Image (cartoon, rainbow, N blue to C red):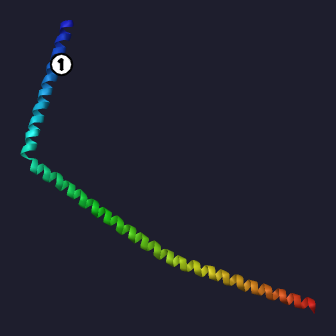
Amino acid sequence: NAEQLRLTEEQAAKVAALEEERIAAVTRRVGLLVVRHSTAIVRAAFSGWVDVCVEEKETRQLEEERKAEVTQKLAMLLMRSGTAIVRAVFSGWADVCVEEKEARWLEEERNAAITK
């Protein structure tokens, strides 16, 4: 039983060593590939970066256009509403003035009737 355990540990160590060798070999191959194709990798990286920058710029422009459109619509709405509000205020004010005049006139008539 102890010998089987020792064999299993040795096998595990061998498997681990083989795995480390495999990883080192792959790393060396990737390193050589990068050295050989570094120009293409740099081009691809910058090409991707340029694409992202162009996309970001377009997105920002669209957002600015939307904001400008919303601001313009809001300004037009406020202008229309503002005019309507001003009309309503002046109309209400005119109604109050007319009512006050009528109330004063009635008061004056009442006072005149009392003094007669």
Q: Residue at x 56, y 79 (%)?
A: 84
Can residue 1 be seen here?
A: no
Residue 110: image x %, image y %?
Answer: 87, 87
Q: Which residue is drawn at 21% across and 6% down?
A: 2
Residue 71, quarter of the rendered image: bottom left
Q: Mark 1 points at which residue?
A: 12
Q: Which residue is drawn at 10% across and 51% down?
A: 40
- The quarter of the image holding the N terminus is top left
Badge 1 density bin: few <14, some 14–19, many ≥20, Cα 10 Å: few
Can residue 22 be seen here?
A: yes
Residue 12, quarter of the rendered image: top left
Residue 29: image x %, image y %?
Answer: 8, 37
Residue toward you, 46 or 90: 46
Residue 68, quarter of the rendered image: bottom left
Residue 22: image x %, image y %?
Answer: 12, 29
Please, is residue 2 above or below residue 80 in the view?
above
Residue kind at label 1, given as amino acid type:
Ala
